[in-house]
Image (cartoon, grey):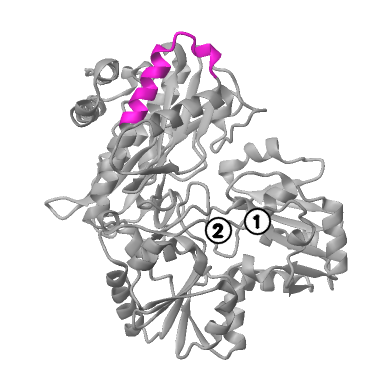
Amino acid sequence: MVDLNAFRDELRRQGLNAFLVPMDDAHMGEYSPGSERRITALSGFLGSAGFAVVTLDKALIWTDSRYTIAIRLEVDEAVWTIGEIESGGPLASVSGFLKPSEVLGYDPQMHTIGGVESWTQAVAKVEASLQPVSLNPVDAVWRDQPAPPATPVVPHGLEYSGRSSLDKRRALAASLSKQGLGAQVINQSDSVAWLLNARADDIAGLPVPRSFATLHADGAVDWFIRPERITDAMHQALDNRVVIFPPEEMNARLGQLGGRVGLDRTTCNAAIAETLHDAGVEVVANTDPVVLPRAIKNETEQQGARDAQRRDARAMIRFSRWLAEHPAIEQESELSVAAALLAFREQNPDPVPMNGISFNTISAFAGHAAIAHYAVSEDSSLPLAKGQMLLVDSGGQYHNGTTDITRVWAIGGQATDRQRRDYSLTLKGHLALARQAFPTGTMGHHLDVLTRQFMWAEGMDFQHGTGHGIGSYLSVHEGPQGISKKPGKAALQAGMLLSNEPGIYREGESGVRIENVELVVTRDDGFLAFETLTLVPYDRNLIDLSLLTPEEIAQIDAYHARALAEIGPDLDGADLDHLRQTTEPLA
């Protein structure tokens, strides 16, 4: 942890009255290694979305609605003032922490181009000034800051990627040329990893090497990464149009770029833009060209996703049987069931390698399940008890796909009427989205109400999005597609993967969320639809048939029949018996 008094002394030394501390690192990804978790070091907050401002006498932190309960458990409210990003966040609160003539510091590597412009405007309104720093004051006083990760970089084989790096680069380079761009600087590590078919273990749950790249309009790439990290296999996979440079040479190489250079204002850090401007390079705002092609999975990636989900289903079904048949389930805890699930995933024979989990497992019992992104710890772990619900949101990283699934179980098979009602209303919304067909050009927010309609009728809602994109042995959260109340950034297209995860949460009491992974496919009539890839039975102990229509019951039965037909042949003995029992027709 960073001592706030020492941090404020450093602000004074640098002539600052306040400092911006975003969740982002220089690559602007959702996930960061421990060495980049500056908000956590300052405040103790463990979530993946947040923003802090520390002044000489105030400490303020904002997060989004996923973490509104969790942050109050992790942050000392006697020290920190907590706000919600949806209510305007720090940009709307500048007058509350900054006075005229004061200096607000920021690290340009940790803010996007567009972000710095927004802060410049906000600070000008209170007649203060915004000042970049060369030494991040958090780093200056963070005595136990971990070393940056530098794991070996290995190739992501064609048998999994379905497309060579050279082919990807040629296609994107042709697009750059059409736009009159000489190059595009790629800031996000998962974009670089996709472009070069490279993987590493720099970030827990996200198998990428943290690096930058410049894609030239002729398909050549300058890759900025420590050369010693590149394995022999990765060297052999690269063609001679990819040139590796150590990170310290990046600014000099950027300064040598000619022509017009594209930067994504929403994901490129401001320090890169400053380097190019200082060198007289013409900068053009241009969306990261990797984002959309990466989201539209090719046939190999689609089949890989199906295979990974089936493999994951085997582990989940074995785990479900373990929960149901455990003779002393009340001796288990949130932590122990998360460990058991990991063991089931790891002990799941398959020729395709597994590389850990895709995010920290959310193992949430009873009232903890009301915390959408609950992080279990030794101190918080609850013992299980019959008559309450257990929510487990988890996923695996397999070389052929990334998985994400949420299931809720009634421990001991016992549930109250209200628990069954909450589960069944959530299930109705989940089913409604899964069976919906839609025309080309449909955005995610056009479909979002399908999952919420039954909750809204009861005066309830959930504050997170309904669905997020999913990578192919990359990030479990991937854009540009998504399903939420907010207007989308991209229309849904065939080949995209999305989660389908509505929920009902009762603070201090319970939480329900049901999540499957859906693949967007094209029907024979040209409309788009979802192919559900996750094949794990719902808990029939929590289903209130009186709340379901005949169509919904038939949909569940058909889904369960698919699970038995597709996963059953890979199971035997008691595991197969359990699958048969849990997929018996409801009707």
Residue found farthest to the front: 232
SS label for mark 2: loop
Residue found farthest to the top: 327
Where is residue 8? Give x, y as percent. 85, 58
Between 102 and 131, the one lying in front of the other is 131
Relative vertical location of residue 253 with respect to residue 271 in this rendering, above or below: below
Which residue occupies 49% across, 87% down? 257
Q: Is residue 211 left or right of residue 76?
A: left
Q: Quadrant of residue 68?
A: top right
Where is residue 314? Give x, y as percent. 31, 30
Where is residue 477? Give x, y as percent. 44, 50
Check residue 464 in the rendering and tell me which mark sits there, or answer none: none
Instruction: Kindly tell me whether residue 557 is visible in this rendering.
Output: yes
- Indicate whether residue 325 is drawn in magenta: yes
Q: Quadrant of the C terminus?
A: top left
> How busy is the neighbourhood of tag 2: few (under 14 within 10 Å), some, or many (20 plus)?
some
Instruction: Kindly tell me whether residue 538 is visible in this rendering.
Output: no
Where is residue 401? Give x, y as percent. 33, 47
Check residue 147 in the rendering and tell me which mark sits there, or answer none: 1
Q: Amino acid at mark 1?
A: Ala
Relative vertical location of residue 518 with respect to residue 230 in this rendering, above or below: above
Looking at the rendering, the stretch of residues picked out in magenta corresponds to 314-332
Reading the image, the residue beneath label 2 is 150
Q: Is residue 129 left or right of residue 455?
A: right
